[in-house]
Each structure stands twice: as structure tokens, then as C-alpha cells.
Amino acid sequence: MKRKVLIVDGHNVIFKSPELRDLKESAIEKLINILNSLSFIDYDELYVVFDASENIRKVYEVGRVKVIMCAKNESADVVIVEILTRFQDEKNIVQVVSDDYSVQLGAVRSGQLRMTSREFFTVVDRKTDLKEFSRYQKKRRNLAEFLSEDERIFLEDLYRKLVKEEKNE
């Protein structure tokens, strides 16, 4: 069975989003939360890779997202291409989110899919809309909740009259 993998170029996506960019220090956490909350239902594995932060590479998981913080001598682009080559076989479908040319070229060369940051946020917005819609559907309210007691009684009486007339015909 094919595994679907999503790899996100973290800082690249953050800098392309005014909302995330304005968050400064908490932008990384917010992006990880976005990935976890949407869970990108179609993906079996989620990676987000960030450029150099400390002397050593840090890899940890937050929910379903594998977070990779590159070492100072590493580039997120290089790490993303490494991950791409690791999944480079017919049993995997990998999609990379980045606006960096080298990352997109690495995805194309390995026969994988690429997505720009703008396309990514379009998907995020659409998934969020669907989540909002399904949340609304679960909380569907009854018409009686919006009516006064007199209006409710009037409509119930009207309904009973119509049902009686229909039975008599």
C-alpha cells in the first residue's frame, strides 16, 4: 500500500504567510498546530523542517507531525531533499510544500509532487472551511430553538390541521 507523505519547508511557509510572519517566535508552534489540527487526513506521515537553530539537529514529534530543526551547518532545503530521496520509490507518494526552487527541483527530479506556500494555504483554508461546516452540521439546531412559545404552538397547530386535511382527502 502506498504511503502518502507531506514535507513542509517550515520557515519558507512562515515567511510567505503574513499571519504567521507577524507571530514571530510563536509562528513555528502555530504552523505545527495547523498541521496537527487539520491532520491532512490524506497523509500517513507529516514532516516540517526548519532551518538552522542550534549546533545539533533536533528531531521530535508533536502529535502526528515530525519536526526537524536543522543544525547550524545544515540547510532545511538539503534535509528536505534527503527525506525525498529516502521515500523515492513507487510505494510512496510524497508532496513537498516550498517556494524554494532547489526544493521544488528536488521533488520533480525524484518524481514527487510539489506545492507552493500559496497553494498550501488554499488547501488549509478549504480544509478549515470543511471542518467549520462539519462542526456546524454536528451542532445543527432545531427550528423550535429560534421561535417564541406562541410561534411554536401556532406552527404545531397549523401542521396538525394540514395533516388532518390531508388524511381526509
Image (spheres, rainbow, N blue to C red):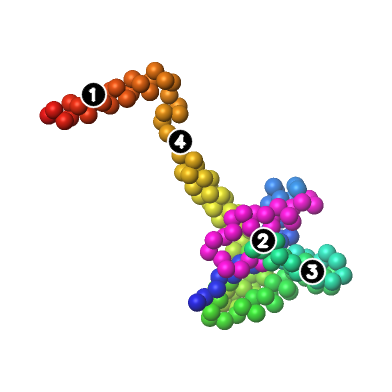
Q: Choose mark 4 or mark 3, whichever is in front.
A: 4
Could you give the CA–CA distance between mark 4 and mark 3, rounded to whole angstroms? Answer: 47 Å
Residue 113 horizontal/vertical position (percent): 57, 70
Q: Could you tell me which secondary element the residue under label 2 belongs to? A: loop
The residue labelled by disc 1 is: 161
* Residue at 69% across, 47% down: 19
Q: Distance between the residues labelled 2 and 1?
A: 56 Å
Q: What residue type is labelled 1?
A: Lys
Q: Where is residue 65 in the image (x, y as percent from the top left)?
A: 66, 63
The amino acid at mark 2 is: Gly
- Distance from label 3 to label 1 (Cα)? 72 Å
Could you say which quadrant of the image residue 60 lies in?
bottom right
What residue span does the magenta drawing correspond to? 24-47
Residue 149 position (above or below residue 92) = above
> Which residue in the protein does label 3 denote?
58
Q: Dominant secondary structure of the magenta stretch?
A: helix
| Distance between mark 2 and mark 3 Cα atoms | 16 Å
Q: Which residue appears at 75% of the width and 48% of the height? A: 23
Q: Which numbered disc flags the more N-terminal residue, 2 or 1?
A: 2
Q: Which residue lies furthest to the right in this view?
A: 55
Q: Is residue 90 left or right of residue 37?
A: left
Q: Residue furthest bottom?
A: 89
Query: Are the residues at dot 4 and dot 3 in contact (C-beta closer than 8 Å)?
Result: no
Considering depth in this image, is 54 or 142 the residue closer to the camera? Answer: 142
Q: Decide: is 156 above or below 54.
A: above
* Residue closest to the eye, 144 or 77: 144
Which mark, residue 83?
Answer: none
What amino acid type should be assigned to the residue bearing mark 4? Arg
Q: Which residue is drawn at 87% across and 70% down?
A: 55
Q: Which residue carries the number 2 mark?
A: 63
Q: Position of residue 49 (x, y in %)?
A: 72, 66
